[in-house]
Image: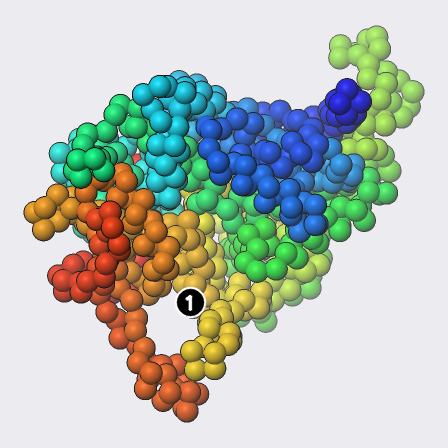
Amino acid sequence: MRDERVEAKREAESLDEPAEEAKALAERLGLAPYPVRYWVVDHDEMNELIAYGGFQRRYPHWRWGMNYERQRKKDRHGLGKAFEIVNNDDPSHAFLQESNSAADQKAVITHVEAHADFFANNRWFGLYADRGEDGPNAAARLERNADRIAAIADRPEADRDEVERLIDAVSALEDTIDQHSPVDAARSVDEPGVSDDVTDLDDDAVAAIEDRIAELDLSEEVRRDVFDDEWLEARGEGVEPEEPRPDVLAFLRDHGKRYDPDSGKAVDREPWETTVIDALREEAYYFAGQKQTKVMNEGWATYWESIMMGGEGFADPDEFLTYADHMSRVLGSPGLNPYKLGFELWTYVELRAARRDVIDKLLRVEGVTSENFHSRIDLDEVAAALEPHPAIAGAGPATLDELAELAAEGDPRVDAEAVDRALSARNGERPGPDGEGEGDPDAGTDIERYPWKLLTREGLAERHYVLSRPEHRTALRNVSRETLDERARYMFDVDRYATVNEALADVDRTSGWDRMLEVRESHNDVTFIDAFLTDEFVREGNYFTYEYSRATEQHRVASVDADDVRKKLLLRFTNFGKPTVVVLDGNFRNRGELLLGHRYNGVALDEESAKAVLERVFELWGRPVNLATIRVEYSDEAIRRAKRRETEPEGEAVGVRFQYDGGEVTEHDLDPEIEERIAADEVDYDTKPDDWLA
């Protein structure tokens, strides 16, 4: 064991320099990450961390052991290697696997720095992170919860099995929080859907909300469904929308009881039970940010990892093939791959912003209009002019003299001090900071390993300019007349250019990265996909939807239409990809029963799973519980007829109510009025970030 600890310490020390330089490079690129503390762990420790959700300590429960065994088997059989784990905290804690190669360690460190930037700057993480005086100190909070629940389980008056049953029940409902509001937003209330914490908003505040909504660049469909007039008026009046109430877990905490089998009645909970519910609900909010931004977050980290590792040579030449294999495995994973989808969407965000900037400049050239753009502009010459300056593209020891000339002219792309130090080292001079004495003897060696130090963010942006990358050099040629007309509408007679070269001289090479930073702040996966998964993106990426055909009894391609692809993906990410269930009535049929409603959006519930969860809800309510939903039923005749015609059968939407009172789950017809309340006319993406918009 001692030898293993020594080896781990040695490995950790070898990563000090890459970690320090990766942070410096990330900041030079414009990122602003939390500080990161790196830990090197062995296979077993990594499997434990995965089992515990990325933390070293959690509350006592049997599922952690189950998670550990599952991960250990996957690891042993090569079904999934974990390169790293990083948690959303300030500072962030990253755990690297001891057996990683040097190239893998560097790759995960650059990946982690980008994650830490996303954690620190995305507002959906802020819904949890902004709590308390100590900021997003999740590790400390989860450790306190672990101690608190362990102490409860050890009390004589609290049966350990009962504690675990309560944890089971709450865990089954951890995704029924209102993830669009801060964890403390839903407190004890008199009636479902009416908040005690009411904030009146004046007209200026409502206007500010409308401005923030406009910045999201959403489609009209999602804009109408998500931020409808009724919702906006409710914000202005300062009153939460009436029923349904989205935070089911908070409602159960505030109004639920415990079923007493001895008396056969619902009784008040013990204080420790509410303590456990609150602790687990808070943890659900911590993990909500990760679930809501999986595509964005992993795509963001993969994008900047590729810039640092490949574009800036953070992987040494002898490590590059290992890194390339690492990246190909990450992006080549089958199924809905958040790394690949996110990486491609972020690249598209960058491309759109850069292309728009160039088009805006070219449309201001005298004599150029949207009608004659392609005939008047030589796009080959434009592409050549947008290539990075040779000294910028090849920044390093070989271009020092050219960079020094640029620096002497005050070129903002060059770090003049770094160039001066490197020249002094090359010439055998070692001036100190004040021009005298010994300076940095390693300045020359340093820029050989890390040539990016010779450039500012502007220089790095030019070096990696998206329109100069081989795969995007035709992006301007493919601009449609419709896009040109749209941009031309914003052109005025001022700020005109006499020539194309004058216009291109004003192109902002940082525009793509700047836009990415803006988007990184405000979006979650649902709004991100809605805003940027365009017709062009779907067409260029060859995306499509598939579904199970009841007629052919096999899966088939259903559509290549961008709207269909977008809707399919939105359904996968709305409410963590889980059914949206809300509180409809806390006194259903005037009997103290709970009525939950599944917001039916065209995707049916897994009824067996729903029935099992209903039993867990009963444990937190103590009285009969009901769940209203809609299923689509297909007659045998409709299926036979569809098979003959090679079409899909037409089903009938039927309202159903499931009830559980401690015995068996029973099924009942659903009142038409309730069915109308839970049925969506169109897809309801249910993403209302109430708090941060205000």
Q: Residue furthest right?
A: 428
Q: Residue furthest bottom?
A: 644
Q: Give the x, y percent position of residue 601.
A: 31, 62
- Left or right of 195? Residue 320 is right
Q: Is residue 52 among what the camera can see?
A: yes
In the depicted structure, whether residue 486 falls above or below residue 80:
below
Residue type marked 1: Asp
The quarter of the displayed image where residue 380 is located: bottom right
Residue at point 45%, 59% (across, down)? 569
Q: Give the x, y percent position of residue 214.
A: 34, 49
In the depicted structure, whether residue 547 falls above or below residue 213:
below
In the depicted structure, whether residue 107 falls above or below residue 408:
below
Residue at point 60%, 34% (across, down)? 48
Residue at point 42%, 67% (across, down)? 563
Q: Give the x, y percent position of residue 595.
A: 19, 50
Q: Is residue 361 among what the camera can see?
A: no
Q: Mark 1 points at which residue?
A: 563
Q: Give the x, y percent position of residue 297.
A: 53, 43
The quarter of the displayed image where residue 396 is located: top right
Residue at point 54%, 37% (across, down)? 65
- Left or right of 173? Residue 464 is right
